[in-house]
Image (cartoon, rainbow, N blue to C red):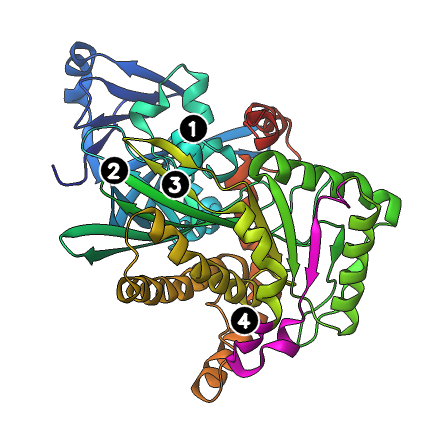
Amino acid sequence: MAFSKGYRIYHKLETPPYSVIVESRSQEECLLFESGAVAVLSAAEKGAIKSTFSKMQDAYGMLGVLQLSVGDTMLHNLVLVTGCMSVGKVQDSEVFRVTATEFVSLRNDPTDEDRVSDIRKVLNSGSFYFAWSSSGVSLDLSLNANRRIKEDTTDHRFFWNQSLHLHLKHYGVNCEDWLLRLMCGGVEIRTIYAGHQQAKACVISRLSSERAGTRFNVRGTNDDGQVANFVETEQVIFLDDKVSSFIQIRGSIPLFWEQPGIQVGSHRVKLSRGFEANAPAFERHFSSLKRLYGNQMVVNLLGMKEGEHMLTKAFQSHLNASVHASAVKMVNFDYHQMVRSGRAEKLQSVLKPQVSRFLDDCGVFYFSRDGGVQRCQTGTIRVNCLDCLDRTNSVQAYLALEMVPQQMADLGLEKSQLVGRFQETFRSMWSLNGDSISKIYAGTGALEGKAKGGKLKDGARSVTRTIQNNFFDNSKQEAIDILCLGNTLNCDLADKARALLTTSSLHVS
């Protein structure tokens, strides 16, 4: 069965109170939204009242209910997916990118549209994905292959519309039956033929919602040790009943720092807390990484310019003084100095010797249905530059391509010609992955750092970034905050909602 608009939305206008019914092609029951409440109606109950309702529209799926407080009034908007496009199939599921959403005011007030327009822009930006399966059990995009096989419980860091599920949960509705789960980031899927076999090659980047936001509004860490632009990126190959996965992570330097003022050209960097005040969050960050991913190595790509050099020294000092000092090695690699005009020889000659033993020790994840888990990835490399965008993506792509031969050996695909074909495909996917992450955080695709034509494109993107970051990101930041946290930041209801949201620190034992 092909994916289609399986939801129908009806409303009753004639007699108050205003009511909305949602039907699903896969459910006999329907949902009734009325007077701020939600109820599940049986087929008989629906039949008794449906004649008083008229059809509004169809939708591919529902994301939940957005709750906004305006003074003493609570506004409810039903959030629908009305446009999406397939990016590929993995196992029994098809992955879709959200391209259009609609917000239905549950009090039928057209002025509510103005209040949600920025949130809709964020959701329609092309950065959100969901999975669907005709079997009814779809792939959980929040989970990497290792976690999906070991525990199969949603990683709430990467569950972006969690707050939109709360309203239905409050009224006892089983959200699994009615609502989609959104992941934010990038998904690239390609089919590669290996003889008579058909492999799926994927690069999946999952952006954390815990400290989400735009480049100059969200930097560094918070008190819980959650950092800006934290992304888990998985390079994964599916072949028949086997899967091989390699994970890397990126994230802002886990200290309290910012870049105040209008940002043009070289950006002024400022540490906003002293050494002792930074330490607890720093410790929490690396303790969390150890718990989630195992052993850690830091690859820091900052340069020797004033602000970047100051951050590098502060990062190194905190690591040296922390309980993680003996366990976490930090490699400083001045990317701009070493990799000029896109030439990557120094990645091979200078960086690789410093990380190769760690990569060999950590390995990749490998599972086959016949033999179960045969190898786990026991650690990750944590890569950062200033924004964790262009330089970071280049180095992560290099490291990931270095691991392709090991992944393919596990899958029994060792012919050098075939390995080269996979590496070329992954190289293209990593470039697109860099664009996906950059658009979320900086408002443009990634800068390539290449000579000639690439320089012109980079220049245009830099100008666009400057305009975006200085003049449009504040409203985008507020929209992201409302989407992730539900409501506004200083409202009592939002505090209660935050308490109900499952965080990774609670979720992971």
Q: Which mark is residue 150?
A: 1
Instruction: Evaluate whether residue 66 shows in this view.
Output: no
Disc assigned to residue 241: 2
- Which class describes the residues within 10 Å of circle 1: few (<14), some (14-19), or many (20+)? few
Going by the numbered disc 4, the residue's amino acid type is: Gln
User: Where in the figure is residue 155, as x and y percent of width and height?
Assistant: 48, 33
Which residue is at a point 40% across and 46% down the rendered structure image?
245
Mark 4 or mark 1: name the one nearer the start of the chain.
1
User: Quick one: 292 or 74, which is closer to the camera?
Assistant: 292
The disc placed on residue 348 is 4
Q: CA distance from mark 1 to mark 3?
A: 12 Å
Choose the circle earlier in sequence order: 2 or 1: 1
Residue positioned 57% across, 36% down in the render: 292
Chain part drawn in magenta:
324-349
Give the mark nearest the N terminus, 4 or 2.
2
- The answer to which of marks 3 and 2 sits earlier in the sequence is 2
Specify which label sits upstream in the sequence, 3 or 4.
4
Calculate the distance from the C-alpha at mark 4 to the C-alpha at mark 2.
34 Å
Nearer to us of marks 4 and 1 is 4
* Mark 3 to mark 2 CA distance (whole Å): 11 Å
Q: Is residue 455 left or right of residue 110?
A: right
Q: Position of residue 453 (x, y in %)?
A: 43, 86
Work out whether 410 lies above or below 164: below
Q: Secondary structure at mark 4?
A: helix
Task: Work out whether mark 1 precedes mark 3 in sequence or the reverse, and give the earlier one.
Answer: 1
Q: How far apart, in angstroms, are the residues tagged by discs 3 and 4? A: 26 Å
Q: Residues within 10 Å of mark 4 (few under 14, many from 20)?
A: few
- The residue that disc 3 covers is 366
Q: Relative to the observer, which residue lies in front, 252 or 299?
A: 299
